[in-house]
Amino acid sequence: MNNLVFNTKAEELKTSIYAQAPDLSTKPLQLDANDNLLVAGDFTISEITNPVTIANASLTVAGTVTVSEVTNPVTIANASLTVAGTVTVSEVTNPVTIANASLTVAGTVTVSEVTNPVTIANASLTVAGTVTVSEVTNPVTIANASLTVAGTVTVSEVTNPVTIANASLTVAGTVTVSEVTNPVTIANASLTVAGTVTVSEVTNPVTIANASLTVAGTVTVSEVTNPVTIANASLTVAGTVTVSEVTNPVTIANASLTVAGTVTVSEVTNPVTIANASLTVAGTVTVSEVTNPVTIANASLTVSVGGYLFTSDLVADNPITGTGVLFNNTDISQVKTASLLLYNQGAVPLTLSLQISPTTTDGDYIDDPSYTNVVLEANEKKYMAISSFAHYVRLQYLMGGSTGTITAYYNAQT
């Protein structure tokens, strides 16, 4: 007689699932403490003709994630993906989407030789190594809410647009854009680079238009055949800004540009415009070997020249009426020489007084006896030397009910 005995308690069952190893041996598959499937080596998806979806709540790879030679879409959309090695997308003929809520890579992220769009759009992407986009014939979008790279971000040899548009991008190494035949846009809300930003050998427009760009190293624009625009709301460079060997216009038009080192414009065959609202250079400004116009048109420009600091401020074609002031509370306490150059740009006479004060309080200002109620007739110009010793100076106008137009320059040397 045969007896069959069944164990009805699932927790007492000892059944295992085995997989065949490369040496033809069989090994049991294992889970971690959170019941996640463990993968100790590489994770590769290749030569697949239908869609592949990897959508775990959590995926951890100690080796590499590779997507290659795939003819249909691939989606990697885990809630969390951690890779200790590299993430590579290459030789793919249909879209690839890497859209985890969080992606952390200790190695590199590489996108290359891809003929259809690639989107890397994690909420957060952290790379300890490098992010490389190269030899791609269709658009590539890196649009994480936050992207942090301890190494480098490189965009090169790309024939269609590349957009790096994270809300925040921090690079401890370098940002390089080179040998690109279609537009490249770097338009993060905030971009911080501890190394350098380089734009070179690019045949179509490049736009660097972050709301804020901070570079501890250098910003270099060179050997570019189409316009380059650096138009951040704020640009701070601890090193140098260099524009050289460029055959089309270059515009540096930040609202504010601060350079602790040097600004150099050289060997440029078309116009260069530096038109920040404010430009401060602690080092030097050099313009050389330029065959077309160079315009430096900041509202305010401060440059240290031979141990002397020269400051210029401008009010251009400004309509004035009633009673008011220009250059209010201008500090002259450290100034050796200063002056005002005034131009009546209209037909209405202007009545002007130079005022000085020991404080910024309105009632403490008094008229300089040398320049009280000076009348500038139509199209007349006037020079006022600021020779009386005081802490603050300003220019008052008394127009009554009339409206005139004035252009005024304040020049000072300390």
Image (cartoon, grey):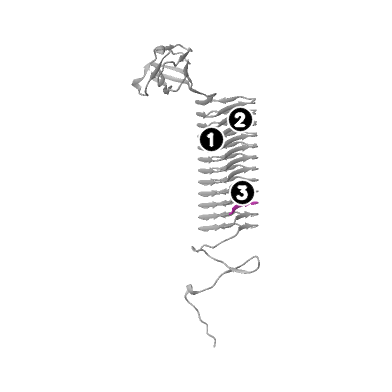
Query: Looking at this view, is 376 or 361 the one in front?
Result: 361
- Dominant secondary structure of the magenta stretch? strand
Callout 3 touching callout 1 (CB < 8 Å): no
- Residue where numbered disc 1 is placed: 238
Task: State which tag comes first along the sequence, 3 or 2.
Answer: 3
Residue type at the position of mark 1: Ala
* Residue extending furthest toward the bottom: 1
Residue type at the position of mark 3: Val
What number is the disc on residue 249?
2
Residue 225, picture quadrant: top right
Q: Is residue 89 magenta?
A: yes
Residue 330 is situated, as x and y percent measured from the top left of the image, at 42, 23
Residue 360, picture quadrant: top left
Callout 3 touching callout 2 (CB < 8 Å): no
Q: Quarter of the image for the N terminus: give it.
A: bottom right
- CA separation in Å, label 1 and label 2: 25 Å
Between circles 1 and 2, the one closer to the viewer is 1
Task: Name above or below for residue 30 compared with residue 217.
Answer: below
Disc 1 element: loop
Q: Is residue 284 magenta?
A: no
Residue type at the position of mark 2: Pro
Task: Name above or below for residue 122 compared with residue 271.
Answer: below
- Residue where numbered disc 3 is placed: 111
Q: What residue appears at the point 51 percent right and 29 percent down from the top-left corner?
A: 280
- Left or right for 109, reference 388: right
Q: What residue appears at the point 55 percent right and 49 percent down from the top-left corner?
A: 128
Magenta range is 85-92
Disc 2 element: loop
Is residue 368 at all visible to an observer of this figure?
yes
Task: Name above or below for residue 115 compared with residue 2.
Answer: above
Is residue 99 at all visible to an observer of this figure?
no
